[in-house]
Amino acid sequence: MKTSTSSPYLLTVYLILLYSCSSPWEKQIHGSYKIIKAGTLEETIDESSGLIKESDTRYWTHNDGPDNRLFLINKKGKILRTDTIQTGFWDWEDITKGDNGLLYLGDFGNNQNKRPYLKIYSYNPVTKALIDTITFIYPDQKKFPPHRLEKNFDCEGFFWYENHLYLFSKNRGNKMVRIYRVPDKGYGRHKATIIDKTILHSPITGADINPAKNRYALLTYHYLYIFGINKGKINFAKPVDKILIKDGRQMEAVCFVNDSCLMVTNENRDIYFINKK
């Protein structure tokens, strides 16, 4: 096991122009954040792909597939518990938690855009029981795979909100990111609902909603986007901040610690906390 023993250090953060070529919310964001390195994940977690808060001191994470293990960790990255979950295809890309206490595992990795049916598993961490399998399709995908400019059907970030799961596409084609929504229960195959779309030039690797349910975050390779939630609607209409994380490594997972602080991990097993100054 390796954990960080160095003192926390401050990374420089720049807030830059939030860009969309087809949206009226293009503007300069003012403000400042600090990013503190808090620890290092154990070597078993060699590619943390999803992250969600369990309590003030504990968090769930998992590797990018193929790996069917969930890890409960502390803020320093030490593994406290490991759950092995027997599911089918193992390309878990993100994890979220509902107000019902269930964890949701996004088995929707689709780099080549060839998978016609994607899955999300609900899991009870108290009883260690797999509860449900939610199967869905993207309604706007007609070819498997589509033309390279239409490769919008991969996903690495989602969150739970009001009995639904909101997915954010990782666009490998024309950079048009879409929000999709599916119910948080199975009962057959679902056709995902398209909610909104915008242009983001950095691929989305993680997502989460804050405890107050009035903001959500999208993580990309080197940026963190914060959007407001107006009248309970999840869309791109209310951008708040865009934060450049000057780390140099690819960011992979994000979760809210509280309404003003976020936790992120990168592919080098580093753990950071991002706080509004």
Image (cartoon, helix red, strand yellow):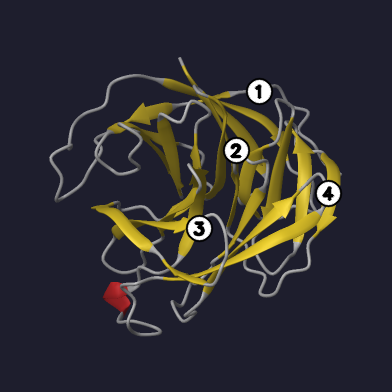
Q: Which residue is mark 2?
A: 99
Estimate the spatial distance between the alpha carbons at disc 4 and disc 1, rounded to whole Å.
37 Å
Most extreme residue toward the top is 277
Q: Position of residue 266 (x, y in %)?
A: 59, 46
- Marks 4 and 3, how far apart at CA: 27 Å
Local SS, label 3: strand
- Residue matched to label 3: 156
Q: Quadrant of residue 93?
A: bottom right
Which tag, 1 or 3, sits closer to the chain's start?
1
What is the quadrant of the N terminus in the image? top right
Type of amino acid at the residue the image marks with label 3: Glu
When the figure is inspected, residue 57 is found, relative to residue 186, above or below; the finding is above
Q: Residue at x 79, y 56 (%)?
A: 129
Number of the label disc, if any, that sits on residue 209: none
In the rendering, which numbered label is found on residue 127?
4
Q: Nearer the viewer, residue 122 or 21?
A: 122
**Which label belongs to residue 8?**
1
141 vs 101: above or below: below
For marks 4 and 1, the one nearer the N-term is 1
